[in-house]
Image (tube, rainbow, N blue to C red):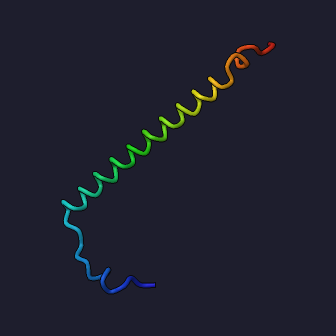
Amino acid sequence: MSAPDEIRAVEAETPEIAAARAKVRRRRSIALAIALGLFAVVFYTLTIVKMGPALFDRAL
């Protein structure tokens, strides 16, 4: 399969555009990682709170 003519006709990116896109990609990746981390912390916190005293009343 080949790309349509209008896509192949696009000029190559300038270094400035490539750097800007890389910066945006990096920031998006960091934001997603932070959001995923916060989700995991909230999920496990709610799980522990929901378990309540049952978590500590185990027979050893």
Q: Residue lying farthest right?
A: 59
41 to the left or right of 5: right
Q: Eyeballing the image, is 56 above or below 5?
A: above
Q: Measuring from the top left, give residue 53's x and y in whole percent.
A: 70, 16
Q: How many numbered marks, from 0 up?
A: 0
Q: Eyeballing the image, is 22 above or below 6?
A: above
Q: Measuring from the top left, give residue 59's x and y in whole percent.
A: 81, 13
Tell me the residue at 69%/24% (across/down): 51
> Residue 6 lies in what quarter of the image?
bottom left
Q: Nearer the viewer, residue 48 or 6?
A: 48
Q: Eyeballing the image, is 1 above or below 60?
A: below
Tell me the residue at 18%/60% (across/down): 16
Tell me the residue at 75%/13% (across/down): 57
46 to the left or right of 14: right
56 to the left or right of 59: left
Q: Measuring from the top left, give residue 35's x and y in whole percent.
A: 44, 40
Q: Measuring from the top left, give residue 47's x and y in whole percent.
A: 63, 29
Q: Nearer the viewer, residue 18 or 29?
A: 29
Q: Residue lying farthest bottom?
A: 5
> Residue 19 lies in what quarter of the image?
bottom left
Q: Eyeballing the image, is 49 above or below 33?
A: above
16 to the left or right of 53: left
The quadrant the C terminus occupies is: top right
